Structure formats: structure tokens, C-alpha cells
Image (spheres, helix red, strand yellow):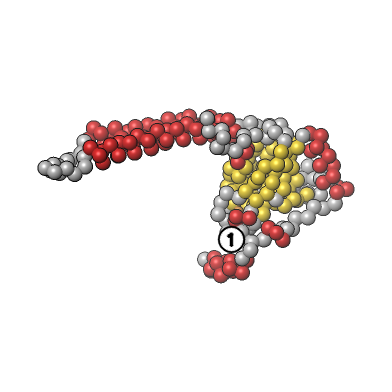
Amino acid sequence: MLDWWLPENVSTYGQEIDWLFHLIYYITGVTFVLVFVTMLAFIVIYRDRPGRRARYTHGNTTLEIVWTVVPALILVVLTILSVPAWSRIKMNMPPTDFVVQVTGKQFNWQVTYPGPDGKFGTADDKTLVDEMHVPVNKVVRVNLRSQDVIHSFFVPQFRMKQDAVPGREIPQWFEATKPGRYELPCAELCGFGHSGMRGWIYVHTPADYAKWAAQNLTAAAGPAVAEAKPADTPEEPKKAEPRKEGKAKQ
Ligand SMILES: [Cu+2]
């Protein structure tokens, strides 16, 4: 019912996330309406009228227990209902077709492919800036890192979001079901250039991906440039300076 509102889902696990989202949305929506209707009704029913005296009340223990226990139960049930999605998406890594390393830094996503030898950290690695290319219908593992502060790898159409934390490599995965170009914004306020920190994920058909890889990932393609494009640098780098000095003193 809310499909017009959410971005298109092109992820194999998007349905599970959307289902929980809708469930929580409707529970909070119904609660909101009930609370406001009751409040408005009470405002009218108990308004000041000539001859009516205010009454001191001690409250109602039964009511208080009910409105504490019911929300608590709802939270417990929501937790139980979200366990299968959480365990499938976050705790288990399905057999991976494909691995890329993504490093967040102020203010870019660096996307590294292992190159023809299939190993990271070797001379033939290829690093792209703010651009990731993957084939459709393949399980892609993203080993997520950060070079400086906390960033958040967010792909709304994949229903995927994960913080990149300095000092950790966090494996995540997705399987895109439709070719296209999808936005990859940083969803963590990470500094002055945060709003400009975004990349694009290109999901290709197998043939298109093979073509792209042949042109860009083979030894013949030459080393990819890992430097940030000028357009991606924040507009006010000077203003950021005093902050950095302050941080260095810590
Ligand atoms: Cu960021």
C-alpha cells in the first residue's frame, strides 16, 4: 500500500524489510490516531463550563499497567518478528559470487576490485571513486571499511544500510534484481562535505558487465585512478580546519 512512497525495491531481501517497515508504520499510525482522537475528545468533553469544578484524581493503576504492558509486548513481538530478516540479511553470508572492498572516506566512496589475480592488496587492484559496477542477480559481498570517521553505506533501492567503522572491516551483501543506476549516499553525518558524499551503483546485465569488466578491470585497462574528483571536495574546506586541530588535541 505504501509502494508509491518507498523507492523501488530491487533487492532479493527488500520485501522482508518493507514488510517490517509497513508493519511498524501501521502500528505507529494507529497509535497516533487513537492518542489524538482521545486527546481531542477529552479536550471537548472536559472543557471548562460554568458550575463545573475541577476534580483531583489519583490516576488509575490498571490503566497505567495496561498502557505500559501493551507497548512493551508490541516491542517484544516486533523484535521476534524481525529476527528472521535480521539473521538472513545481517548474520549470514550467502555463497558469494563476487567481492568488492568499499572504503568510506571524507568525502568519497572508494570501490576496490581485486583485479585479474582475484586478491586484494596486490598491484593489479583497481579502485574506482564513487562508482561501483556489479552484475544483476549475483550475490555481491561488500567488505566495508572506513579510513577516517563513521560513514554509512546506504542504498535505498537495495534496502541496505550499514555503517562503515574505522578499524573494522564489515562484510555485507546484496543481490540486485534489476539492471539500472542506483544512488549510494552516505547516511552518516560525517563532516562538512557529507551532503556531497555519494556514489552510484551500476547494475549491469551479465553481458554488459563482462564488457565493462574487460574494459576496466583487466591488466590492459591500466591502473584506475583512485584520487578524488575535484567536484567531490567539500566547498568549505577552510572552515573545517579549526575543528580538525581541536580533534587532534584529544
Ligand atoms: Cu560519509
Q: Is residue 52 visible?
A: yes
Name the one closer to the observer, 159 or 89.
159
> For mark 1, what is the residue?
192
Q: Is residue 30 left or right of residue 229?
A: left
**Position above or below: 104 against 205:** below
**Position above or below: 99 against 226:** above
Name the one closer to the observer, 31 or 51.
51
Quarter occupied by residue 235 = bottom right
Q: Is residue 226 left or right of residue 59?
A: right
Q: Residue furthest front?
A: 50
What residue is shown at x 68% (from left), y 39% (from top)?
Answer: 141
Q: Residue furthest left?
A: 51
Q: Name the residue type under label 1.
A: Phe
What residue is shown at x 75% (from left), y 45% (from top)?
Answer: 113
What residue is shown at x 53% (from left), y 33% (from top)?
Answer: 2
Name the one closer to the observer, 5 or 225.
5
Residue 209 lies, in percent from the top left, at 79, 38
Q: Is residue 101 left or right of residue 90?
A: right
Q: Secondary structure at mark 1?
A: loop
Q: Is residue 88 visible?
A: no
> Few, some or many C-alpha atoms within 10 Å of disc 1 (few <14, some 14-19, many ≥20)?
some
Q: Is residue 60 left or right of residue 195?
A: left
What residue is shown at x 85% (from left), y 51% (from top)?
Answer: 222
Residue 201 lies, in percent from the top left, at 70, 43
Residue 142 lies, in percent from the top left, at 67, 42
Residue 80 lies, in percent from the top left, at 46, 30
Name the one closer to the observer, 7 or 191.
7
**Position above or below: 40 against 166:** above
| Label 1 beta carbon less than 8 Å to ligand 1 | no
